[in-house]
Amino acid sequence: MRVLVPLGKGFEELEAISVIDVLRRVGCEVVIAAVDLESQKNLIVESQGGVKMVAMVKIADVQNEAFDGIVLPGGMEGTQNLIASKEVGVLLSALNARGKIIAAICAAPLALFKHKILTTQKFTCYPSIESQIENPNHCNSNVVRDGNLITSKGPATALEFAFYLASVFKGEQQSKTIQTNMLAVC
């Protein structure tokens, strides 16, 4: 399974790193793409807390590549950079049209809404973001799936979200194994 994680300056580090780590542990190929123009110059993307991650590619370089899914980490500035990215919008539309997994956590469901992906589906997000998404189907669960769309609340739900994504991409057994190995299940 091949999964894209686009990072814009100001991404929420726990949400990004948890997903990247867990998906790689279960054997997914995770491609990290720099979204905003500043980060694309040197592929270094700075999180909201000042953590610097090195992306593998520029978002423009993966426009024609095949992915089984895309995961958007939150963080308000990072989400605004995802919203501003035409390339992210094109990728989301293409993946959605093919029924591929589209996942977002924290503030990032706002990017799905702005790119016209989150329209009538059930979803969850960070509480202060809910009022910015014109969709009456908000749920209060930590992780919500509606069709190919998977959303989660925020930093404290990041591992639960990552484990759920692992089960979707690689199966329930591999997800349970990694949860046991990481001491999430004792």
Image: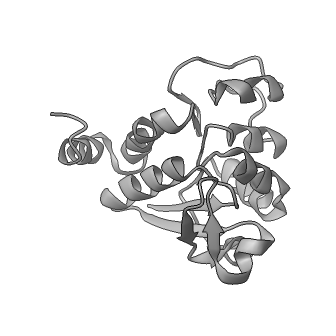
Q: How many marks?
A: 0
What residue is at 68 percent from the left and 20 percent from the top? 138
- State the scheme by which the image is colored: one colour
| Farthest-out residue, front | 50
Q: Nearer the viewer, residue 179 or 150?
A: 179
64 in relation to 146, above or below: below
Q: Where is residue 124 shown, x and y percent of the image?
A: 62, 27
In the rendered image, the residue lying farthest to the left is 186
The image quadrant where one finds the N terminus is bottom left
Give the vertical position of 23 relative to 180 (above or below). Answer: below
Residue 75 placed where, x, y %? 66, 46
* Visible residue check, residue 119: yes
Q: Is residue 1 left or right of residue 12?
A: left
125 left or right of 119 in image? left
- Residue 72: x, y in percent? 62, 50
Q: Is residue 159 left or right of residue 119?
A: left
- Say which residue appears at 72% left-offset and 26% top-offset: 128
Residue 93 in view in this figure: no
- Image coordinates of residue 94 in percent, x first then y, are 72, 57
Viewer-closest of 20 and 97: 20
